[in-house]
Amino acid sequence: MVLNSDASEKENGTWHGDSIEIALIKYVLTKNNKKKELEKKFPRVAEFTFDSSRKCMTTIHQTEKGILVITKGAVDVLLGKIVIDQKPLVSEFERKANEVAYEGYRVIGYAIKEIRTLPEILNGEEIESSLTFIGFAGMIDPPRSEAKEAVSACIQAGIIPVMITGDQKLTAKAIAKQLGIITSEEDLILSGTKLAALSEKEFSNIVEHVRIYARVSPQQKLQIIKALQAKEQFVAMTGDGVNDAPALKSANIGIAMGINGTANSKEAVDMILLDDNFSTILIAVKDGRVIFDNILKFIKYILTGNFGEICAIFLAPFFGLPFPLLAIHILWINLVTDGLHGLALASEPATKGSNAKYFCGKDGTAHTKSWFTDGFSHSVRSILGYSRQHSTLANNYFYRPLF
């Protein structure tokens, strides 16, 4: 764990590097505080950095007897690279790893190999073959306390949360159940391997029912987004890695992590979470919907009020009546009735259940049309009601100039 890690401790005591590696190193230091001595005794001479397609990382160290190869990564991947002598033990290794994964732990395997000399040309496949599996580490990244509430609020607001993770299916399933992402038997879990085996049509048929994607490649993330968009879904995606940039750019709303996000991911997105907190997205959605709701209220108010003016101006000539309103009259009415009232409507706080209304048309036009129709009908009703209840005043309004 100590040698196969890029995490480093600064002079001020803080750690720099991947959060998983930092957690592993801190655990090791509680058992053995000889990190620097081990790094000096077994210096690193070469490495193969972590790759999302290989799903492992390999470091190569010089020893007194030769070369030591240490590989860290997904257990299922490492078990496909072990020596023949360990092949009969694969099922037992898998069983023990799955027991830990069922409890929501992220399982990281370790394997080693000793060779006499370092090849002049390093070949990753050759170096990462015939390994001896030596064990695995289980670590848990518990969901934040507010995450479950945020997921529940998203579902109530019409937002469907989908988990895309590098963890194996069992770990992802356990975490998703804790958060409430999986709520029924219709919710599916799809691994990267199974996704690759599906045709475009087969995937299109199930994409709206998949709630968890486990061990998917960056290209598959892009495939998921395009498949959802083809189903007329408005897709927002969060990400923090370099490989996430293409998918973040293709999403309708790309969201990068402000603390742990890479520069590439931040450049490709529309929004950056400064606190890396999922619940912050929900707050932004709620505020956005309040603003949108208030805009539509104002439009409805304008339609209702101005429709009477339009009817008065256009219908009067048909009945042989003089124009009831001059330009100055219209300007005065709009100034008195629209300005202050519009400000009041625009600054209204959220009403009960406003976050549960979702104006989720892809471009918002469907709901805007319904509001326009609603505003038009209110206008007609208000004029008819006004004329019935106040016939005298209505006559004055239609037959005489106001000034």
Image: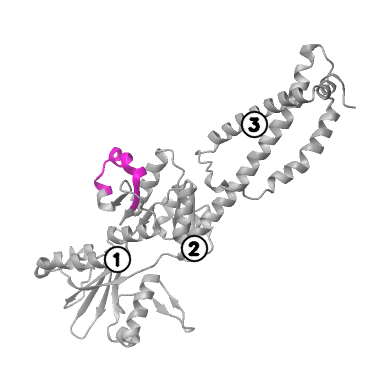
Magenta-span inclusion, residue 210: yes
**Residue receiving disc 1:** 103
- Locate residue 29: give its quadrant: bottom left
Residue contact between numbered discs 3 and 2, judged by CB atoms under 8 Å: no
> Mark 2 is on which residue type?
Asp
* Residue 203 % position (x, y): 30, 42
> What kind of secondary structure does the magenta stretch mostly adopt?
helix
**Residue receiving disc 3:** 375
Where residue 386 is drawn, which disc sits there?
Answer: none
For residue 143, above or below residue 43: above
> Mark 3 is on which residue type?
Gly
- Residues packed near mark 1 inside 10 Å, few (<14), some (14 to 19) or many (20 plus): some
* Residue 345 % position (x, y): 70, 44
**Residue receiving disc 2:** 276
SS for callout 1: loop
Q: Quadrant of the C terminus?
A: top right
Q: CA distance from mark 1 to mark 3?
A: 54 Å
Which tag is nearer the camera, tag 1 or tag 2? 1
Mark 1 or mark 2: whose residue is earlier in sequence: 1
* Residue 286 % position (x, y): 56, 51
